[in-house]
Amino acid sequence: MKIGVVGTGYVGLPTGVGLAELGNEVICIDKDENKISSLKAGKLTIFEDGLEDLFVKNVQNGRIRFTTSMQEGVENADIVILAVGTPPNPITKEADMKYIHAAAKELAQYINGYTVVAVKSTVPVNTGDSVEKIITEQHPKGEFDVVSLPEFLREGFAIHDFFNPDRIIVGANSTRAAQMIAKLYEPFAGKTKILYVHRRSSETIKYASNAFLAMKIQYINEMADFCEKSGADIYEVAQGMGLDSRIGNKFLNPGPGYGGFCFPKDTNAMAYMGRAYGVNLSLIEATIRGNDQRKINMADRILQTVKDIPEPKIAVWGTAFKGGTDDCRESPAMQIIQILLERGAKITVYDPQAMDNARKILGDSVAYAPDMYTAADEADVLAVLTEWEDFKTPDLQKLKSQLKTPKIIDLRHLINRETAQANGFEIFSLGIK
């Protein structure tokens, strides 16, 4: 099939590469000339585990191309996938639809023959209706359908998730559009549950799913706080909870709070929609408040270990919101760093992949280390904030020689406590007294 993908970010680019790998002819479209120039030159503009090999392979075999021209990407396409950003409004936190609407308005004029416009961006309920209206106004004789095709790609695992989806949700209000999407996902037929629902239901599923997972994270973080006070072990508690098939063992790892571009944005947008429709989504509202406070509490815990030191020097391992990605947007690590800076700490950071993105946000307010041991040089405490594999088994004796005092605040429970203690470290992990 011929497919146009509008947007080359953390959703659009892995989706385009994945569809090319399945044998489709893909054209990725983006207004950012620098991005397109880099992609045409064979340089990825994001880091995503496993993406580079597939990207190079499909560029070389001609299955994927890149352009700034909407016309080039749309006029011969069977399906046009919208994967542009829906950033939160800075005041109301509702999803900002300007990029979706602008893309719909532009692509409408190039629709040539029956085309399915698939909205993969996370969008509010009724977005399909508005996109349909915009295209119809721009191209009254255009033959098209609009479907909702929400993405469920985890950053850091996007390539794995593309080829091994838990489920595929299709919100289609016409049989013809559903049949077109069925053809697109034919390689997954029989292996993955493909659920066809009404368009508005599909639009709601993504928000409802992310809000539920965010609540699960906030819940286990609160249980971790309880375990610290009561003497229970949160990791034993989580293991016991996870054995219940109704609960499951995923998203039961305590940490510094949820982050990234999706969960904060989507929980806020869902809460806004609840208020707009007059529905009290109290659990989601409480989750948002609790997660915001979580970052402050974690910064306080780090500072508590150096409370007697004026202008303490803190080493930070990890700036990305999670391991496997270079994305620092809404990263708990970045938020904690900024709180620490406001409280007068001096900070040196290291991240295996996200240093450039961290620098764009933090500027010269912190020092940047070339490796994780240099970051710890003469630091009063080490804070582990992102769950990179590199941080799990450090050379503890080397680390001890770098630190001014052998203290570790491990907010990701990566480093073995008993081993660290046996090497002379004072180590703090969440949910353990």
Image (cartoon, grey):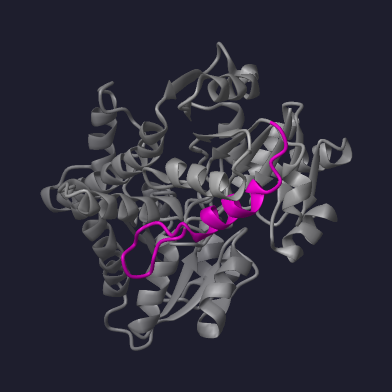
Q: Where residue 389 appears, x then y in whole percent?
A: 55, 47
Q: Is residue 98 above or below residue 49?
A: below
Write down the quadrant of residue 335 in the picture.
Answer: bottom left
Which sits in the foreground, 415 or 219?
219
Q: Quadrant of the N terminus?
A: top right
Write down the quadrant of residue 36 in the picture.
Answer: bottom right
Q: Where residue 287 appears, x then y in whole percent?
A: 23, 52
Which sits in the foreground, 43 or 175?
175
Which sits in the foreground, 100 or 414?
100
Q: Is residue 432 visible?
A: no
Which sits in the foreground, 141 or 104?
141
Residue at the location (40% across, 75% down)? 338
Q: Is residue 250 left or right of residue 163?
A: left
Q: Is residue 182 above or below residue 300?
A: above
Q: Where residue 402 appears, x then y in whole percent?
A: 53, 71
Range of magenta residues: 87-113
Residue at the location (69% across, 61% down)? 31
Q: Is residue 369 left or right of residue 207?
A: right
